[in-house]
Amino acid sequence: MEPRRRARLELSDQAWEVHARGWTTTDAPPAVEHPQGDDVFAALVLDAPEAQAAALVWSERHGWRTSTSRRHPLGRGAEWPPPGPNVRYLATGTTPDPADLVKALEATG
């Protein structure tokens, strides 16, 4: 299966779970991007007032993290930033159970 399609299918469950928590206004899966080479990224903007972060960023190589920007959640050049007060790593591996991702985000909020 083509990488973008596979990633989109895997991300749809996470998008639905985050929407079910009231953190997004839509349950649509995020667009999958290739900002650099063959690395696959996606950003899920958390646009509801109750959201625990501005956005969630997924990398096929790194897993999930939070972002401080809704406008540019991947950041400059889509480099994977170090953890800090506003960038939290949430799940290792690329396809965690959606409920585990939500629990990790709630625990760091």
Image: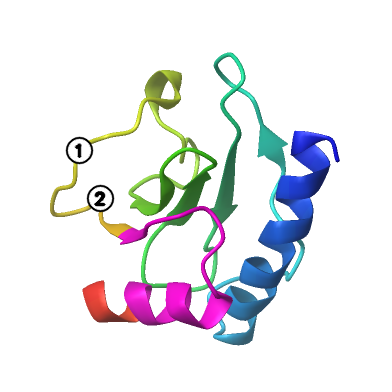
Rendering coords of residue 47 (x, y %): 54, 64
Q: Along the line of sight, which residue is nearer the eye, 6 or 82?
A: 6
Q: Are marks 1 and 2 in contact (CB under 8 Å)?
A: yes
Q: Which mark is residue 87?
A: 2
Instruction: Give the camera-side residue of 2 and 56.
Output: 2
Q: Is residue 96 magenta?
A: yes
Query: From the image, which quarter does the N terminus lie in?
Result: top right
Image point (73%, 64%), residue name: 12
Q: Would residue 74 appear left or right of 4 to someone viewing this image?
A: left
- Residues shaded magenta: 90-105
Horizontally, residue 51 falls left or right of residue 60, namely: left
The three-letter amino acid code for the residue at tag 1 is Pro
Q: Which mark is residue 24?
A: none
Residue at the disc numbered 1: 82
Callout 2 environment at 10 Å: few (<14), some (14 to 19), or many (20+)? some
Q: Quadrant of the C terminus?
A: bottom left
Q: Disc 2 marks which amino acid?
A: Val
Judged from this view, the residue extending furthest toward the left is 85
Q: Which residue is pictured at 37% across the width and 72% down the height?
A: 52
